[in-house]
Image (cartoon, rainbow, N blue to C red):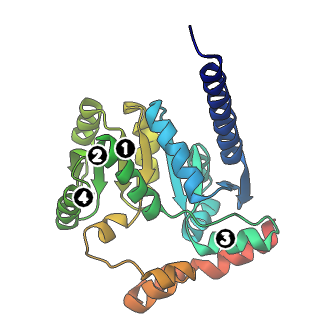
Amino acid sequence: MINPHVQLLKTFTYRKLIISNKELTLTLSKTITILNLPFINTTNQQFISNLQKKITTKQNTFIVTANPEIAVYAYDHPQFQKLVQTADYITPDGIGIIKASQIIQQPLKERITGFDTLTSLLEIANNSSLKVYLLGAKPEVLQKTVKNVKKKYPKLQLVGSHDGYFSDDQEIVADIKQLQPNIVAVALGYPKQEEFIAQHRQLCPAIWIGVGGSFDVLSGTVKRAPKIFQKLNLEWLYRFISHPSRLSRFKNLPRFIYLVKHVH
C-alpha cells in the first residue's frame, strides 16, 4: 500500500516542477525589440536552465548572440535580418544592447554573452558526457581550442571540429549529419555563422549557436577581460586597450545609438 503522505509529496513535487517549467517558458517568451530584433529578456541562469531542458528533450535550437554591430548589420541587410528573426533566441551580447533597452525605456535584465553561454553549454556537456562539434577560427586557433576544451572538460565528447577556412562545406555537413552532436558551436563571425546555422540546423536536433571570436579566448590566443571589467560592463574598453586595431569595430556604435533613438 502506498503511503498517502509519500503520494502527496510526489504529487506536490510534480506539480511544482510543472509550474516551474511553465514559469521558465513564460520568462523566456518575453522579448524586448531593438531595431526589429526580439531580444530575450531573462537572466543568464534562467536561460542556461532552459537550454539544458532543450538538450534533454532534443529540441533543435538556434541561438544568435547579437551585439550592436550585428544589430546594425541586420538593420542594413533585410535578408540577414529575416534570417536572424528565425532564431529561437536572440541574446543581448554587449552592454550597448542593454543601454539601448534603457533608452527605449524597456530595460533588459542583463547581458547574456556568447562566450558565457558557450562555456555554460560546455559545462553541461561535460556533466552529461554530451557530444560537441566545433566549427570556425584559424587552424592553429582551433587546434589550441580543441586541446584546451579536452583538458578543461574531459568528460564531454568532442566528436568533431573544422576550422573556418573552407570553400565547400559538404565534408563538414556530412560529418555533422553522421556524428549527431548535441551542441554545435559555430565561430565563423557574422553573417557567415548565422547563415551556416540557418541552412544546416536540421541536420541534427542540437543547440546551434554562433559564437564569434569565442575560440580565440578558449584557445588562449586572446585574453578575456578581468572580472572587474566584466562586472562594470567595460569589456569593450579592455578589448580596445588590449587591441587598438579593433577601433574600426566600434564605428557602428554611434550609428546604433542614433538608430535606437530615432527608429523606436
In the picture, measured across the screen, residue 159 lies left or right of residue 208, that is left
Question: Residue 189 occupies which quadrant of the picture?
Answer: bottom left
* Residue placed most toward the observer, 205 or 232: 232
Which residue type carries mark 2?
Tyr
Label 1, secondary structure: give it.
strand
How far is disc 4 from disc 2 in space, using C-alphas? 11 Å
Image disc number at residue 133: 2
Label 3, secondary structure: give it.
helix
Q: Position of residue 84 (x, y in %)?
A: 57, 50
Question: Residue 246 occupies which quadrant of the picture?
Answer: bottom left
* Residue placed most toward the observer, 258 or 89: 89
How far is disc 2 from disc 3 in space, using C-alphas? 30 Å
Q: Is residue 184 above or below residue 103?
A: above
In the picture, measured across the screen, residue 48 lies left or right of residue 98, that is left
Q: Position of residue 59 (x, y in %)?
A: 49, 32
Q: Is residue 200 above or below residue 146?
A: above
**On-image quarter of the N terminus:** top right
Label 4, secondary structure: give it.
helix
Q: Nearer the viewer, mark 4 or mark 2?
A: 4
Image disc number at residue 149: 4
How far is disc 1 from disc 2 in space, using C-alphas? 6 Å
How far is disc 3 from disc 4 in space, using C-alphas? 30 Å
Which residue type carries mark 3?
Ile
Which residue type carries mark 4?
Val
User: To which residue does mark 1 refer?
Assistant: 183
